[in-house]
Amino acid sequence: MTADPDCVFCSIVAGDLPADVVLDEPELVAFLDRRPLFKGHVLLVPRQHVVTLVDLPARLRDPFLEAGQRLAAAMVAGLGAQGSFVAVNNVVSQSVPHLHLHVVPRTKGDGLRGFFWPRTKYADGEAAEYAARLRSAT
């Protein structure tokens, strides 16, 4: 398994830096975020140093998503949240260059207001063009 000696998450995975571990499995580790949006905010990482979701090896895709599902369920069962916010940043807004899935407990009216995305509209025929470009790239 590869690790980056300069990566904070690799250091946590190796046990060289302390963390409040929530999930410890052969291929994955989840721990509490040190600067949580809400108490219980968890980061799920592959043990292998992988920078983005695009870089995640195929053999880890299902275990990674399945662990994310379990963590999302744990927000409700273990914390009494009504639901969760689940997100991955790839490069842009990725504070640590090691793939990590944010799983954040959510409750209606919790005040989370930091995720406003600008909305736009497609010109006539433009949506089909974008769909075709994305299809050809997948």
Image (tube, rainbow, N blue to C red):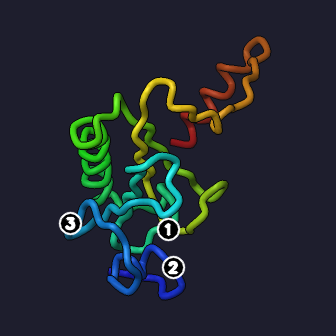
Q: CA distance from mark 2 to mark 1?
A: 7 Å
Q: Secondary structure at mark 1?
A: loop
Structural crowding at the residue carrying mark 3, measured as other residues with C-alpha within 10 Å and reported as few (<14), some (14–19) or many (≥20)? few
Residue holding disc 1: 98
* Residue 20: % across, % down: 33, 67
Q: Looking at the image, is 106 positioned above or below residue 42? A: above
Residue holding disc 3: 25
Q: Looking at the image, is 75 positioned above or below residue 111? A: below
Q: Looking at the image, is 137 positioned above or below residue 2? A: above
Specify which label sits upstream in the sequence, 3 or 2.
Answer: 2
In the current view of this chain or complex, which residue is farthest to the top? 124
Q: Looking at the image, is 89 positioned above or below residue 98? A: above
**Amino acid at circle 2:** Cys
Specify which label sits upstream in the sequence, 3 or 1.
Answer: 3
Front position in the image: 123 or 37: 37
Residue holding disc 2: 7
Front position in the image: 127 or 103: 103
Q: Residue at x 75, y 18 (%)?
A: 121
Q: CA distance from mark 3 to mark 1?
A: 17 Å
